[in-house]
Amino acid sequence: MNSSDHLLEEAKRLHRDGDHGRAASLCRSIIQGDPQNFDAFYLLGFLHGQNREFEEAQYFFGEAAKRNPASGDAFFMRGFALQQLERDEEAISSFGSALAVNPRLAEALLNRAASLFRLRRYGDAARDYEFLLAFEPDFPFARGNLLFCRLHCCDWRWFDEQQAAIAADLAAGKRVIAPFDSKVLELSADDELRCAQLWVADQCPQPAPSAHSRSQTHRRIRLAYVSADFHTHALATLMIGVFERHDRTRFETIAISLGPDDGSPMRRRLNRAFERFIDVRGKSDAEIAATMREIETDIAVDLMGFTEGCRAGIFAHRAAPVQVNYLGFPGTMGADFMDYLIADEIVAPRREHQHYAEKVATLPDSFMPADSTRPISARVFTRGELGLPANGFVFSCFNASYKIAPPIFDIWMRLLKDVEGSVLWLGQANDSAMGNLRREAEARGIAGNRLVFAPYLPSAADHLARLKLADLFLDTLPYNAHATAADALWAGLPVLTCLGTRFAGRVGASLLHAVGLSELVTDSLGDYETKARELARDPAALDAIKSKLQRNHATHSLFDSARFTRDLEKAYLIMWERIQRGLTPQSFAVREAAADQPA
């Protein structure tokens, strides 16, 4: 064994002992004397990756790959580091190099598909998942990922078969689908809970409990919101009014930001809304949790759950005495480290609470806030410039393409067939989705050009203004409109929904009740279809609903940001009061429990 080998073995020992600094110094010494030493470059990349220094990690793995192009692992690890830096195009190239060495490197296929998905290249991602499943049919979560990619493309081949297979696998305790992806399927509440629990056990196993004081007292409750979406994002749009209206005499508000600063007006507004805005990008889950404990966070609110960019592991490290799942993820996280879920009686009826791992805090009205200061552009759009008929009825749905399920689409096509001159106005999707939807329409006897796709508008105010040209927003099931329904209602566009069986499918009903339009909530898809047809044929009835919606903006709770914030704060006060008294979390309804709280 030569001196480089001895030094490398010592570096590996130091790494195993957790002395990363000295291990890295030894690797650099080896490289100085032996610039072609693959192992030293590889270990150095690994050390930087463990410290979340991904820029350095991708460089050293790249150097390792140059010295041994037959190492699929080096290419894979560089791709992984690039992925953490959100340099997905480069990551895809690096994963491709790994697969050129070993076409069956499952992790490379999985990660390349994830980068392709993030770049909205859903068809390419689906092909990687298909190849992976061909030789690893039980690879964790790959089957669900494949189905979700296909749904983004509105590719419904094998949909019923795959949905049934996923339900059977969940019942058998298999890791088959990610919790967010499962929302688009017809699953039971038990399936949904099991899905979340399987994900938590796989993705964020709990470390040893972290020490913190459960009785820390401050003049004000230290309330930390955790999210990667503190920029131009639907969640920020919904929550900004709450952040700005928090009672500063009772709450000290803190943003724990996991995502990028996009330099937008929304980001600047968010910075002003919080008393402290802490950017923790680049830190590990354990480090972020430690930071939150150091600032003595009382209540930590996870605004992401299992949505893109989430970091549930922060909460597994017990970042605060009270930990709350709220808004970003429509359902249970299935984790015993989350104490509460904030909901309302419609999305999470009391009879369903046994299907939630968290205790349920029930708000008096809708669980979803809506900023009442959102501007609607004065720009006047014409139907002609948007590709809509001058006089025909405009059914609309601006939900993401993956929410459009075949049974709902069947109804929409029957409506187009029955309402002469009508069109379906959808948000612009990827090319595959738009092509597939037009083909599916034609297969049902409807000309493809009766589906009109609205291009993305950079101005949210302009988008709200153009919604006024639609006649009726048709909701989806089993995954309802959420932020898109709030947009429509704020713009004065009625939303017709069907009450689902799970949280994600009951949000439309929650919003409609909160704005006083319960008559637009149907209990079955048959009633949904009948109601849509009736409204399309009765302009006076529809106009009356639109007028009622405009009046209710000012009188009902949905767009009363101040009222909503006070109710949410009452929920936080009840949670905090319980823990101060040494009591465990317990489900409660704010309307019933708030009387015991200080005025």
Image: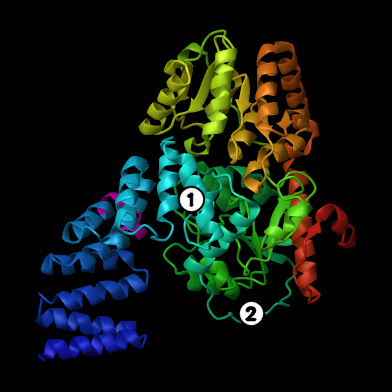
Q: Camera-side residue: 395 or 498?
A: 498
Q: Is residue 461 visible?
A: no
| Relative to 374, residue 426 above or below | above
Quarter that holds the N terminus: bottom left
Residue occupying the point 76% across, 38% down? 514
Left or right, residue 210 beside residue 116: right
- The amino acid beneath tag 1 is Ala
Q: Which residue is mark 2?
A: 212
Residue occupying the point 17% across, 61% down? 101
Q: Which residue is mark 1?
A: 165
Q: Camera-side residue: 365 or 130?
A: 130
Where residue 66 appears, as percent x and y from the top left, is 13, 65
Q: Are marks 2 and 1 in contact (CB under 8 Å)?
A: no
- The amino acid beneath tag 2 is His
Q: Residues within 10 Å of mark 1 (few under 14, many from 20)?
A: some
| Relative to 319, residue 226 above or below | above
Left or right, residue 140 beside residue 212: left
Magenta residues span 82-90
